Image: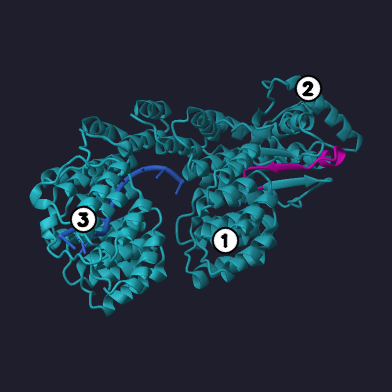
Chain colours: A cyan, B blue
Amino acid sequence: MAIPNPCLVSLPRSHSLPTPNPNSITLNNDRYFANHPTLSLIDQCSETKQLKQIHAQMLRTGLFFDPFSASRLITAAALSPFPSLDYAQQVFDQIPHPNLYTWNTLIRAYASSSNPHQSLLIFLRMLHQSPDFPDKFTFPFLIKAASELEELFTGKAFHGMVIKVLLGSDVFILNSLIHFYAKCGELGLGYRVFVNIPRRDVVSWNSMITAFVQGGCPEEALELFQEMETQNVKPNGITMVGVLSACAKKSDFEFGRWVHSYIERNRIGESLTLSNAMLDMYTKCGSVEDAKRLFDKMPEKDIVSWTTMLVGYAKIGEYDAAQGIFDAMPNQDIAAWNALISAYEQCGKPKEALELFHELQLSKTAKPDEVTLVSTLSACAQLGAMDLGGWIHVYIKKQGMKLNCHLTTSLIDMYCKCGDLQKALMVFHSVERKDVFVWSAMIAGLAMHGHGKDAIALFSKMQEDKVKPNAVTFTNILCACSHVGLVEEGRTFFNQMELVYGVLPGVKHYACMVDILGRAGLLEEAVELIEKMPMAPAASVWGALLGACTIHENVVLAEQACSQLIELEPGNHGAYVLLSNIYAKAGKWDRVSGLRKLMRDVGLKKEPGCSSIEVDGIVHEFLVGDNSHPSAKKIYAKLDEIVARLETIGYVPNKSHLLQLVEEEDVKEQALFLHSEKLAIAFGLISTGQSQPIRIVKNLRVCGDCHSVAKLVSKLYDREILLRDRYRFHHFREGHCSCMDYW
DNA sequence: GGGAACCTAT
């Protein structure tokens, strides 16, 4: 687009103004200037520099001293695709006596900027400096700022003012209030505003529908949509975006398809956002095919369309297709990278996620943002890749990024899962703002490291800080009780959940409780609890019971739990393995081989044990009996040395932890010594310095024999070993483990 | 004179 240089545009004679005297000039005939040719140029600008040229011209002609014209300049500076709030503020500051309209413009500009707080400050300034009181235009902007900040108290104050100045029935204001309350997590208050609106318009309905969707109540959103129909309010494109979003959240493919045809039948104007919402609905409802068909037909696509397709493919594990979309995107912004990285991380492919992160750093097409780092930290946590995780922590500091609650949570989680509880605590204490997720992550960290009492103490501190615990918090606190055998405390928390905190116990909480009771040997009470459950016991519940049966060697109950578990999850090899372990412990070798045959017939294989250890930023993985490592020879030599040294102090292998039935004793012993965690320990001993702890992550639970070996090695070799298994941390030092052998 | 509501990635 060719922008004429405003300085060279000569104004028509009739529009030229006398040389202005800013103090004396008063321009009331606004309409006269609304169509001024200089103003129409403002809309054509594509950079701040051009705005400044127009600004200069306006100063020269005196047009700048017309409040309407100056406000147009502020709006353009603040709300264009190339926003510059600083410049908008500068323009504002040059206006000698801003009128209400101008104040509103600036408040509006900040409300939708990255710094909505400034909106509120400008508002306070206005109360001091302007003779005018805020009007019906001011409040929607102020309420929007409060929504962005999620400042419930501030917004409520505005609500009060609105009523006081008799604007309480302005539909624009009330609609913003619906959005505001919902954004602050107060759906109920939002709904109260909605039902009390005297004359609802389509935006009122849209605001409420969207509020329900985003507040996690898609069912209610769809009901409202139907009520809207019965009240003959015609939905528009934005309504349908909300409705499609609700279908996506519910994974309701049938209704989603119906909505698609509804939109076509009622000729609801197509828009890019609507098409994107439709794409999202199809991918979330499990039909990437329908999404792809629509995608190919779309006349215009934006980054959201591409990202939605990418996520669609990635979530169903079609990584090649996802990668194809990624490569075909016109420009890979950070959201696209994030989508791919987080898809890998969430599907249990953390290594792939980290490879992509490295690629991102090399590509330089986009810069990692908070979302990237959250996903990457989570991948580090899964792998126990502490070097990279720590590097990201440094990166965050170097970039001067502020730790938001998401990032804080991820950092704490990473340090905990990599075994550095001290660093996690440091991060935890260093941040001022702690939301429920930050607290919960720290409680979980203490729990997995066996500091049950500290976890409970932190839970109390959380109450003092007035942060309300949620379902996740309770899962973590019950976990803490289970790890250290705090039965009485566990019972109390479980009973208080609903009564005191209003959090309904879910399946997970029942599973934790069964685990607590079962581990402590209270198998009967655990069974009673299962029988009393208000919902169907999920696999996790039976798994907990089965685990308890393994510890307390209850063959009969184990068989029952296992059959329930396998009915729910036919592919759960863990269940077979646990039952087989019970049989092996009880010496019922015929049943062990029977189970093995059954597993073969069903086509199930024992998930191979895999341990990983990070050395100098590289993650090394070991499978059972792995020979593939470049240093395999050295590792096995070290292992032989360890066995010999252990035997001198009277170590006897504990063979009950073998799934397979092996006839000859020494073969059995060897198989034990091929366990992946032992290989990782041997590798750790030869490849890390004496002062460094050995950090290992195992995909399954550590077996009893490996546990005793690790204890002995920690003493014999004077080395700390941190082993994270599927369930918790084991911190071996001087011949002891932090779990106190309760696991 | 202008204002409210919508899609992806945590």
Which numbered circle lies on residue A62? 3
Kindly indicate the quadrant of the structure image that contains residue A645.
top right
Q: Is residue A324 left or right of residue A415?
A: left
Query: What is the distance, in whole Å, between disc 3 and disc 1 at their CAs?
Result: 50 Å
A415 or A44: nearer the viewer: A44
Q: For residue A332, what is the image quadrant?
A: top left
Q: Amino acid at mark 1?
A: Glu
Residue A365 picture location, percent across and down = 44, 31
Q: Secondary structure at mark 2?
A: helix
- Looking at the picture, tell me which residue is in the foreground, A406 or A510: A406
Other-residue count near label 3 (Cα within 10 Å), few / some / many at <14 / 14–19 / ≥20: some
- In-image side of A69 versus A119 (left or right): left
Q: Quadrant of residue A715?
A: top right
Q: Which of the two discs, 3 and 2, sits closer to the camera?
A: 3
Q: Which residues are magenta?
A: A713-728
* Label 1: element kind: loop
